[in-house]
Image: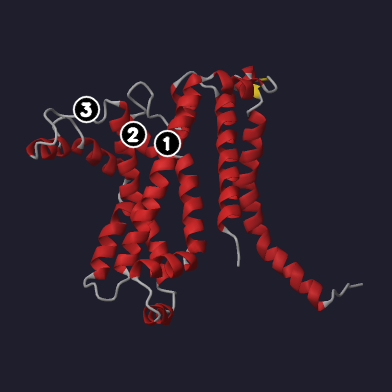
Amino acid sequence: MKIRLPLEKRRKLVSWLFLLPATLLIAGMSFYPMIKAFLLSFTKGFGKTSEFVGTYNYQRLFQDSLFKTALGNTFIYLIIQVPLMLILALILASLLNNPKIKCKGLFRTMIFLPCATSLVSYSIIFRSMFALDGFANSVLMNLNVINKPINWIGEIWPARIIIILAITWRWTGYNMIFYLSGLQNIDPQIYESAKIDGASASQQFRKITIPLLKPIILLTAIMSTNGTLQLFDETKNLTNGGPANMTISISQYIYKLSFEYSPQFGYAATISFIVFLLVAVLSFLQMKVGDKRD
């Protein structure tokens, strides 16, 4: 005997059948590795020599000076680079949204292009620009700003500055596109009304542009924070964590623990979970602070 389901139930069943492949893929490709990594963080050794060590790896974090250095470096990049990049992206988007500016498409493309550049290629260019006999030192010496070449890659703070510059150069255009799309959705009549009421350009920016772009600013802040906490390519390709591991990021330290030093997959998984928790906590705080709906 055939069982006939009500129409509403059949629609729900069909909807779940369509969702099932994507759900299985996400569960298999994302959640299963996360659970395996979490279990791995309680082990030591690898392969047949792997053994359960409880919270030993988590306790080890407090005595690991290189982990503290990597964590500190990552927060330095995060605190300096993310606000700098987002403010710059917002200013550029506001300028390029002005209808009086000509060749806007060309400028927008030029600013966005670094985002499409190969990571290795632009790292090599930055390394050559900031070499002892590179472009940056030549310009500064010709302008009599410095007397002798700066060892940008070989000293701690210059190397960190190069990494911050490189990330900002690459990702500012990417964030600018988000702000530009948000600005183009703001009704121009709001600005015209503000002008009639005597609002200056800075007042319009603070009272109209910033509040209306708040959801996009929140989105880009969360994405940028997430990306910076997982920073790997720039520190690996520009400085390789040097000098003396003083520019190493957390992700590069995880890579070294897994593939450069004697393999310590359990400890690397432990640090990965610390990054996961940092991303979750910072994203939650940003959403709580930024998403205050009127």
Q: Residue at x 55, y 28 (%)?
A: 268
Helix, strand or loop at disc 2?
A: helix
> How many residues crowd around disc 2 within 10 Å: few (fewer than 14), some, or many (20 or more)?
many
Whether residues under marks 1 and 3 lie with C-beta atoms below 8 angstroms apart, the answer is no
Decide which of tag 2 and tag 1 comes sooner along the chain: 1
Tell me the number on the disc at residue 30.
none
Residue 180 in percent (x, y) is at 38, 66
Looking at the image, which is closer to me, 10 or 68?
68
Whether residues under marks 2 and 1 lie with C-beta atoms below 8 angstroms apart, the answer is yes
Q: Disc 1 designates what residue?
A: 76
Decide which of tag 1 and tag 3 comes sooner along the chain: 1
Measure the C-alpha gap from mark 2 to mark 1.
9 Å
Helix, strand or loop at disc 3?
A: loop
Q: Amino acid at mark 3?
A: Asn
Q: Is residue 66 above or below residue 85?
A: above
Q: Residue at x 25, y 59 (%)?
A: 110
Q: Disc 3 designates what residue?
A: 151
Q: Is residue 258 above or below residue 89?
A: above
Residue 227 in percent (x, y) is at 46, 45
Q: Is residue 231 above or below residue 85?
A: above
Q: Disc 2 designates what residue?
A: 160
